[in-house]
Image: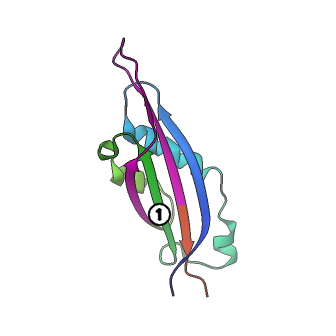
Amino acid sequence: MPAKRVILELGTGNDLHGGDYTKAALRAVQDALHHSSLAMIRSLKVNPKTGMFVDVTIGVQQPDKVDLEKVRASLPHGIVTVKAVKGGLDVPDPENNDPAVIASAAVCVRLELP
């Protein structure tokens, strides 16, 4: 049976100095996670190691600069997949060569339900 989406959380994160896309992505994911409590996982007796799928999409201006493995490792539960796509926002600081990076995260949780 295909897993059904039960949660979609959105978050934003930034790196104000240094232009670190991974740091901004990690902060965006943590922002999204802090909007949710997965009490239903326990209530439904879902094994998060086998029946919970977490799909993360990160939007940044330079997707190839996100360390997807670091983002994946930051998720505490589930079978996690991460992809980075064009999105987010870079705020240039040409005088100091110190751009601010803003990332968006969409965290989708799917469960195998009867």
Does the magenta stretch mainly form a helix, a strand or a loop? strand
Q: Residue at x 59, y 61 (%)?
A: 8
Magenta span of residues: 80-107
User: Which amino acid lies under the numbered mark 1 shown in the image of this protein?
Assistant: Asp
User: With 23 as the anchor, is 107 left or right in this view?
Assistant: right
SS state under label 1: strand
**Residue designated by label 1:** 55
Residue 46 vertical placement versus 25 (above, below) = below
Residue 42 vertical placement versus 95 (above, below) = below
Residue 98 forms part of the magenta stretch: yes
User: With 64 as the anchor, is 104 left or right in this view?
Assistant: right
Residue 84 image offset from top left, x and y in percent: 38, 51
Residue 1 vertical placement versus 97 (above, below) = below
User: With 75 as the anchor, is 111 left or right in this view?
Assistant: right
Residue 51 vertical placement versus 61 (above, below) = below
Residue 80 image offset from top left, x and y in percent: 43, 64
The residue lying toward the viewer, choosing from 42 and 34, is 34
For the image shown, how many numbered marks are present on the structure? Answer: 1
Residue 39 forms part of the magenta stretch: no
Q: Residue at x 48, y 57 (%)?
A: 75
Q: Quadrant of the C terminus?
A: bottom right
